[in-house]
Image (cartoon, helix red, strand yellow):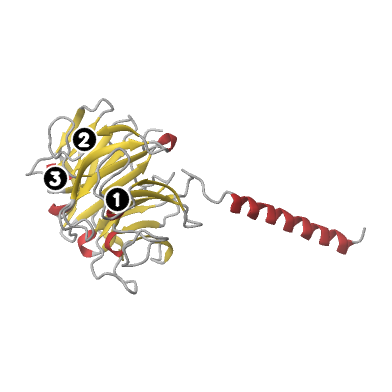
Amino acid sequence: MGRKYIIGLAVVMATLMLISVVDAASTHPDKFNANGNVLISDQFNNRIIEVNPSTGHIVWSFGANNSSDGTVGPKTVVGPNYAERLSGGRTLIAGTGIGAGASPNLTNGSVDNRVFVVNKAGKIVWQYGQAGVAGNGTNELDTPVAAIQLLNGNYLITDQANNRVIEVNKAKKIVWSYGNDKLLKDPNSAELLKNGHILIADENNNRVIEITRKGNIVWKYSGTIQAAAFASRLPNGNTLIADSGNSRILEVNKSKGIVFKYFTNMSAGSNTAPLPSNAVMLKNKNIMIADQFNHRVFEINSAGKIVWHYGKINTPGNGKNMLNAPYTAFVIGDYTGQTMPQM
């Protein structure tokens, strides 16, 4: 057997193997709950979607997928601001609701006021808050904008219009709370840090604060930010902030020095004030951004170059590759800088 024949056979075999891999990938290109998929709270489309970033296909969704549908029910959500993938393919959703005049297609708004967990089939398996009811009593919320699960299985809920952050157990009992009209002003997110403290984006106080469980502020960043929409503590000790009112993402160190910033309104065709609502650092050190009123989510590298995106800039919709005011975007399986849920 000649050398050329051996090389030729090797090439053929390698080609067949490659074809086999490609065929397998094309036969099963999209998988629910696959690490690396992106979970998006598509607020004004009243839905949560899971997207395969390689194909752009929606592999799972929950909600009406209709910007004019304000129906609150067991299979729908109105104005979701937050969604997190939990163990077993379950999804934690903050049904925030939409205020009157906020959405062009739902001008009268619609109240949701629930935080709930759905399984893959879209069945609600746990819920706190009552559909369409605004309040601060037992099992009541008013504009819950964020909810995360803690390692102990409890849920940390940012209850915006009640100006509070509460920890609720699975029996729906509040076991910890912080806030009132004097302490917080429309908080927008809360994360439990490894040291046991709580990091809060105190949106309309234009600050990010770190508090102890007793409510003492031990770190604060303010002065240069407007409408702090989200904050997370990075592995290096820095804090990543969605500085919504200034259309930028900031990374600041413990001494409050800015070590990185990125403006979301500099792309061609951008809304001048897109109000980015969420930003998280990924394991690869890139940053995933929900650019709310540019109607897109995208990933940038350390040089600020966009390496992946979903949605058409400044163009709302619910068709292929389209979003309508997406509020959060998280990579499934990647909790860098975020509170790890119960696994």
Vertical comparison of 179 with 283: above or below: above
Q: Nearer the viewer, mark 2 or mark 3?
A: 2
Question: What x and y, as percent, mark residue 168?
Answer: 23, 31
**Of all residues shown, which one is farthest toward the top?**
171
Q: Residue at x 7, y 44 (%)?
A: 181
Callout 3 crowding tier (Cα within 10 Å): few <14, some 14–19, many ≥20: many
Is 179 positioned to the left or the right of 78 in the image? Answer: left
The residue that mark 3 highlights is 161
Callout 1 crowding tier (Cα within 10 Å): few <14, some 14–19, many ≥20: many
Which is more N-terminal, label 1 or label 3? 1
The residue that mark 1 highlights is 46
Which residue is at the front of the view, 223 or 126?
A: 126
Q: Which numbered circle lies on residue 129?
A: 2
CA distance for labels 2 and 3: 14 Å
Which is more N-terminal, label 1 or label 2? 1
Which residue is at the front of the view, 221 or 173?
A: 173
